[in-house]
Amino acid sequence: MKNMRKIYVIDNQNYLIDTDSHRIYDVVTVGALKNGRRIISINDVGNNNAAKVHKWGCVNENFEEVIPCIYAQLSEHSENVFDATMLNPTSTNSFLDKYFYFLMDEKGVPIYFHHEEEDGVERELVVRFDGFVAISKFKKGLAVGLSHNNKQGVLRSDGSILLEPQYDYIQLGVHHIFTRNGDSCRTLLYIDDKKDWRFVPHGYSFKEYNKEEKCFILNYEDRIAVMDLNANLIILPIYKKLRFEKECIIATNVKNKSGVLEKSNPRNILVDFEYDNIESFCSYYERRNYLGYLKLIKNGKQGVYSLKKKRLIVPICFNANVELLLGTLGENMLGIYDSFHGEGFVNVDGSFAFWAYGKILHGFRDGVVRVYSRNSWVEYDKSGNIVKESEDDSDDTYEEEYREDSYTEEDVWDAMTDGMYGDYPGGGVDYDALGF
């Protein structure tokens, strides 16, 4: 016969008494009788066996416990339906999964109002999850269920079970389900073309779901692999690090050398693995990102690679400690920034030209460049000689004209050929035939 706990009044104090275990609990609150149920709360011993915590449940009109006092919160939702909150016994102390929030019926069974459409008519079904004491909120039709023996499983909103309750802990992700049993952890991935869930292949472990790239990042020993949403390994576990950029993938091999993979076909190597570091080209000094360009660093020197041309457009000959101002590239000259000296210019072969005292807003045009300082400007030639200056620049047209200059392929052509071969001819140029 099932043990029946009941409220007794002793010396004008309410106590919930468990005669089988000989335990007595202080009753804190007793609610009004509605539909044969009273919501009550008791003082119970917390996990540290010292602090007392409130636990909520229900008794009937005879003050017999009909919904066990095991809930962190309990309130009336509607007739014979309650809002319940239960502490997750294996919580990671994350706000997202610390508690189960759910509805339950007058018998203490978790329920869910499932909506489905049939013949154009939507209907609401009450789904009962017998055998479970708590369920999480449903996400895309799935929820974590806590069984009476404190094991967790995964439930579907239609009442069916995806994973039987045999795990110590489960966490639902967007496209993955993490499970833990003791020291063993496994992850299921949602496979689009199968419309089903599959465990991560043997030997691999789940690292993360990349929302932007819509792929799974997996660990294999000390290397990384990438799987698409159809369970195809699009990058084999041969790299230690991967960084997805807008137009490419920067990878690091087991020898700690970096290279570049084509994004649409990661098996195609755009830049060989011979560099100490590769970064997307971002000029902090100019406060802008140069999409389509990469900074390649090798032996303390740096250069610039164009993803569009699939070749170096600035040779690797500049000290890696200076910042290249890519927006100033023109006429075989390139602006740089050094935290000690400030701004200056170098030749694209790596040789230093001069320091410019002021703000460089653009590159050389017709053999001169204008550098600004407050309300004045100075024009330099390529040797660093001042050819013109103004103390009070009332006309800032020149400055505004080039302030938003963008680095173009025409600038590359001018810089690499120094104008020897005329205007930029467009695509299909055989640079090798020209000796570059």
Image (spheres, rainbow, N blue to C red):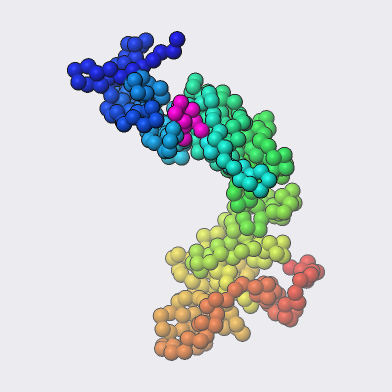
Task: Name which quarter of the figure residue 405 lies in.
Answer: bottom right
Task: Name which quarter of the figure residue 331 lies in.
Answer: bottom right
Camera-nearest residue between 322 and 48: 48
The answer to whether residue 240 of the structure is visible from this angle is no
- 125 horizontally vs 59: left or right: right
Q: Does 412 sit above or below residue 307?
A: below
The location of residue 413, given as percent across then percent down, is: 70, 74
Q: Does 431 sit above or below residue 101?
A: below
Quarter containing the N terminus = top left
> Which range is magenta?
103-111
Task: Name the residue at 59% across, 58% down.
Answer: 280
The answer to whether residue 165 of the structure is visible from this angle is yes
Q: Does 134 sit above or below residue 269?
A: above
Quarter containing the C terminus = bottom right
The location of residue 175, given as percent across then percent down, is: 61, 42
The location of residue 178, given as percent across then percent down, is: 57, 34
- 174 horizontally vs 29: left or right: right
The location of residue 4, given as percent across then percent down, is: 39, 15
Task: Name the residue at 36% across, 16% down.
Answer: 5
Camera-nearest residue between 345 and 154: 154
**Magenta highlight on residue 310:** no
- 63 horizontally vs 266: left or right: left
Q: How many marks?
A: 0
- 122 horizontally vs 309: left or right: left
Task: Name the residue at 76% across, 68% down.
Answer: 431
Task: Name the residue at 46% across, 40% down.
Answer: 96
Q: Residue furthest left?
A: 11
Task: Name which quarter of the figure residue 231 lies in.
Answer: top right
Camera-nearest residue between 197 and 135: 135
Q: Does 312 sit above or below residue 393?
A: above
